[in-house]
Image: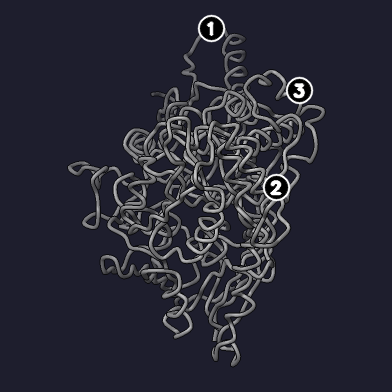
Amino acid sequence: MGSDYFPLTIRKTVFGATILGCLFLALMARADPRHGISMYGDPGLPPDFVSLPYADPEAPRGGRIVTGNTGGFDSLNPFILKGTAPWQLRFLGYEGLMGRNWDEPFALYGLLAESVETGPNRNWVEFTLREEARFSDGSPVTVEDVIWSFETLGTQGHPIYLSFWTKVESIEQTGPRSVRLTFNTEDRELPLIAGLRPILKKAQWEDRDFTDSGLDTVPIGTGPYVIDSFEPGRNVVMRRDRDYWGRDLPLMQGRANLDEIRIEFYGDAAVMFEAFKAGELTVYRETNAEKWQSAYDFRAVRSGDVVKSEIPSGKPSGMTGFVMNARRAPFDDWRVRAAMIHAFNFEYTNDAITGGRQDRITSYFSGTDLGMRPGPAEGRVRDLLEPFADTLLPGALEGYALPVSDGTARNRKNLRAAMRLLQEAGYQAEQGVMRDASGRPLEFSILLPQGSTEKQAFANIFIRALERIGVRAMLDVVDNAQYFSRVQTFDFDMTDFRREFSLSPGNEQRAYWGSDAADQPGSRNLMGVKSPAIDAMIERMLETADEAEFTAAVRALDRVLMAGRYVIPTYEFGIGRIAHARQLRYPARLPVYGDGYWFMPDVWWWQE
């Protein structure tokens, strides 16, 4: 292309007015390059920001952190379906064109790209690469690498990347360091998703199979950490890249402070906690409020060598619990799913396992303005749901709330309700066994990975409760590799479930509960839900530019999901609980999203 890839090639002509008119129209078709982009409105940080608000640009560098994972790993490529890679790799070693500020609902700022432009209605986005952007091997990041990364992840990568690629009409180089993606659907979030896609080195894969890389091939990234060493199934050591290209960027000030991040692997959470107590780990995230109060009276805590820190969060509760596979019996019947929710005695179980210190999740987006409101649907929420009234399950429009027990082990009222629901679904109790019309007993298995001791404790109490109504449930505990394989192929009746959400839910909702993802192996739609109402609410969320309409659509989505009775909810994680070596410090200013990979270890440092 001529004229440095300017979108219109302007030729000399005697018609000066025509030239000026064409130039004006071309300029009007382009948005101004900006330092950042937000889902709604303008990004909160100015072009001359010094650092992220929750990072300390004066933080010292050095030291190391030792954390733990349960299970094992058989791959170092976190971008493909095959194998299991340590989850931390994706966030430590790889970057997108833009980086996120976790103190705003959804705002991105230039990382590999120095600027971003969007077209009218965000139907296209254009990024301009920083000239200094480099891979960890020192080679420059090129537009060719960017295009290859989008195409490869979109066609050969993990299923979480596939949906986005179907919405890309074209991707093309528009300048020496600029690339444009044009979209084929109306979706305001697509430019932001594009900004977060990891960028990999094309040349590394010219003679290799990207989908089959295991422990022999580590994708080359641009992030501040590289793999220094690993022992299969035992540990991975990440080293801070002292030649990291982005160390002087405002977005990176006060981040990636630790010289080394070591990830140790353990058979289960109990063994990992004992390793922490023995000093083998320098940090431990605790999810059980009862253990937080009762199990941290060991010597290192009493001496002050280990510090307990609580990190509040302003994000939605998300959903945690046991998900039921609605693709197959018995959970293809909503009444059976409802019966399971009634039979699950949360109040008693929560008291037994967490001392009653953790509140129950009441909906997928509870704790924020996005969560559904109690009682019947009203106003715009009802307007959005009414066209789908014939497909909605009871409670979506009328109002739905989780059953509450009296806190005793008997749970008589809710067990009676569970029996009634099963009878409505065609089951009858015969000699203490619940059977369908063909005489088959109602039974299922709960799939859990090895090391999930707390989840197994929840499941065992649940199993004993089900016995009282003639339902046989069996605990199926398998190794991590088998567990992930079965979950990816939906080979389970019931299993554990956790989904976290941002304050700006978007395209990931399609992957979680969109109809197109229900039968796609590796998708995150574990329950197998196919609902025109859910699909429509997600589309409305993505299409609207009005925040009030967006909020109404999310609340409506929340209602349909809860009324679907797909998950037996347990407790929420409103507070992050981190026990750590006293030398590990973090900024006084906390991000609105609380704890996560963006907080620990990202903005932590080591200080004697």
Task: Tell me where residue 516 appears, x and y as whole percent.
Answer: 46, 27
| Residue 53 visible | no
Answer above or below: position of 200 versus 601. Answer: above
Spatial CA distance of label 2 from label 1 is: 79 Å
Residue at point 63%, 55% (across, down): 345
The quadrant holding residue 72 is bottom left
Q: Are marks 3 and 2 in contact (CB under 8 Å)?
A: no
The residue tagged with tag 2: helix, strand or loop?
loop
Task: Tell me where residue 542 appears, x and y as whole percent.
Answer: 61, 30
The residue tagged with tag 3: helix, strand or loop?
helix
Sequence-first disc among 3 and 1: 1
Residue occupied by mark 1? 14
Residue occupied by mark 2? 403
The residue tagged with tag 1: helix, strand or loop?
loop
Q: Classify the position of the C terminus by image quarter.
A: bottom right
Task: Tell me where residue 517 appears, x and y as whole percent.
Answer: 45, 32
Disc 3 residue type (three-letter):
Asp
